[in-house]
Structures are given as C-alpha cells and as structure tokens.
Image: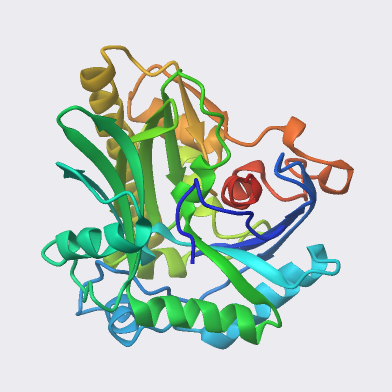
Amino acid sequence: MEFLPRSMGTRPRLACEVRAEGVVAARAEDALAVLDAVARVPLGDGVVFPQTHADDANVAGTAARNGSVVGHGKLVAAVRTALEQVSQRGREVTLVVPDAAVRVLLLDFDELPTKPVEALPVVRFRLKKLLPFDADDAAVSYQVMATTRDGMQVLAVAMPAEVLADYEAVVREAGFEPGAVMPSTLAALAGLSEGERPMLVVNAGRDGVTTAIVKGGVLLLHRSVDLGGELQAAANAEPAKEQGAETSIAAIAARMAAAQTPVAGSSAATGAEARASEVAQAVSVAAAYFEDTLESAPAVVLSAGTLGADVLTRVLDQAEVGPVAVEEMVDRQMLGAGAGSAGSPGGVPLGWLAGVRGALAN
C-alpha cells in the first residue's frame, strides 16, 4: 500500500474519499488529473470512523480499538454508489481515508539505508515509542523529505493494521479492489506542483481540521485537530441539509457574521460554534508557524476540505485571523467536461475534490 504523495509506479485511475459528511469519487484518465467524472453520496448519522487518537470512553474509541467502522454496511453502500457512477472498466481504486485514521510524523535521522527494504525496519523501530498502537503490526510507509550534511528528515505514515483491513474490506465489499491508501491531507497535497512558493493548506470538515505547510515539494508542517468527541453528538443533532452535513459550521458562520455576535441557544449551535473556533485557532497556529519558519506571512490559504473556501473565509474573518486570502485548492481548470457541474449549485463542491484529485495526480 502507498500512503504518500510521491510514490513508485502509477496509482489507479479511480479514487474515492470517505469523510464524515459523505463519500466522493472521481476518475481521471492520466497523471494530469483532469477529472473526467465525479460523484458524491452524503452520509447521514450512524457512521463513525476509527481514530488513532480516540478516547476509549466514546464510540469512536470503541471503533478504533476494534478496528472497525461503526455503520460499516452503510459506508459500503455509499462507496459502491459513488464509484459505480464514475467507473468504466477498471475496478482498482485509490482509497483516501480520514486523517484521524493514521498518524503522520516528521522524523529526523542521521542516516537511513538507501534500499527501502532496509530502511523501513529502521523507521518502524523509531515509531515504536511514538505511536499509540503496535508499530510492528501497523502499515507503515515513509518518504525522505530533505537531506543535509547533518542528516535527513523523513515523513512517516502509520496506520493500525486492523483499521486498514476494515477500510480495505469496505472497498472490496463495494465490488472494487483497493490499489492504494492515502490519508486525506497528504492526498490533497499530491495535487500541488512542486514550485518554490510555500503554501499553507487547510483541510477542514465536520470532524477535524488539518493544517499543512509545503515548500518545493517538502512537507514542513502537518497538524491535525479532532473536532469530534463530545461535539459529535451536537453535530448529529443538527437537522439534515440538502447538500450534506458540511453546512453545520457554515450556517453558524453565516449567522455569526450577519449578527456580529455569537449565535447561541441550541446544543447544535454551541457545537458548531466550538468547531468553528477550533478551525480558526488551528489556522492561526499554522500561520504563526509559517511566519516563524519562512519569515513571511502566507500569501494565500488553500482550502482542501468539505468546509469550503467561502465558509473558511467567514470563519477566519469572524475570528479576526488574517487578513489572508482563501482559495479552493481545486479550480475549474482541473475539471473535464464530465465533471463540469462541480462547484455549481447542485454539483459536487470543489472542496470535496481536493483529496481524490491529488490521489489521481501521479
């Protein structure tokens, strides 16, 4: 399995991402990753994904310990429906999983064997004291980010074996074959060009927010914040919206901006306010790290998640983070004729496509 943006060989020409809000699938014919077809299937209540950092006291913790998705059958049906809308002949898929399903770490080594078969055990040994699960049984992948006279920095990604097996089972039961597995934000980053300009990427949705900084193809920061736990009940209590659950934070942000005062009252509103505040705080921390490390403010924030650039802008404005321009990571030049309705009313929002588009860019 390949977890990382840069991999040997070619990943499948089908990709599917599973998120708390729903499943999105896409097809691209070549490594330019112009999306020829896209589809989205919302997920309602009753589906909870395993998390590598979940609290044992809640249902997500139970799912993580058992290595299983709560609502497995419902997720299988959504994956099958989404992929069947975009697939043609191939059945092999790159599956993009939530960031909370993996651990992403940047490690420093004095040296590392050049052959992967020799280097992987060294990376795995280093992970033993850093992971909350068994490193020996985990699926582990790595990529050398930078090499200097003093050593090297390595990106390592680890996923519990039982969690990986359950996600693979979802794909197989849907009638497809998992050819690669990637975490959401690293998948989105794979769609970036390796220009020298540093970029701040924000992947935000209902259950979590990940901030990442890349420069010249080198990952400088990857930080994930869980928005679930006690807030999950509030999210589930909100009424369903036509375009999916991503409107929970969006609705609160719009109302807060219009009133210029916090919206309170219901537990759903309180939960959405808290999640919006966490998103803003995460971006603020990442922007500060950006300035400290690169000695300049980020020129733009790229939005890669289901929250969307417009809502992220409102969240940051309300929290007085910035000013900073926010743009969608996927633009219309990345869409083929078969995906032309994406980003339009009733179509798949552009933010949903960042992970699958990056997974197809190889």
On the picture, is 276 further left or further right than 108? right
The residue lying toward the viewer, choosing from 279 and 92, is 92
Q: Is residue 260 left or right of residue 105?
A: right
Q: Which quadrant of the structure image shows residue 350?
A: top right
Give the residue furthest to the right. Answer: 337
The quadrant in which residue 316 appears is top left
Where residue 291 appears, as percent x and y from the top left, is 26, 18
Residue ID at (33%, 24%): 321
Position of 138 with respect to 242 (left or right) is: left
Q: Residue furthest left?
A: 129
Position above or below: 7 against 257 = below
User: Residue 4, can we see it?
Assistant: yes
**Is residue 258 in view?**
no
Task: Name the residue: 55% across, 51% down.
Answer: 247
Front-lying residue, 241 or 187: 187
Picture quadrant where residue 203 is located: top left
| Residue 4, percent from left and from top | 45, 52
The residue that appears at 61% across and 50% down in the rendered structure is 352
Residue 64 vs residue 30, the one in the foreground:
30
**Residue that appears at 17% across and 44% down:** 109
Residue 264: percent from left, percent from top: 35, 49
Q: How is the image coloured?
A: rainbow
Q: Is residue 9 above or below residue 291?
A: below
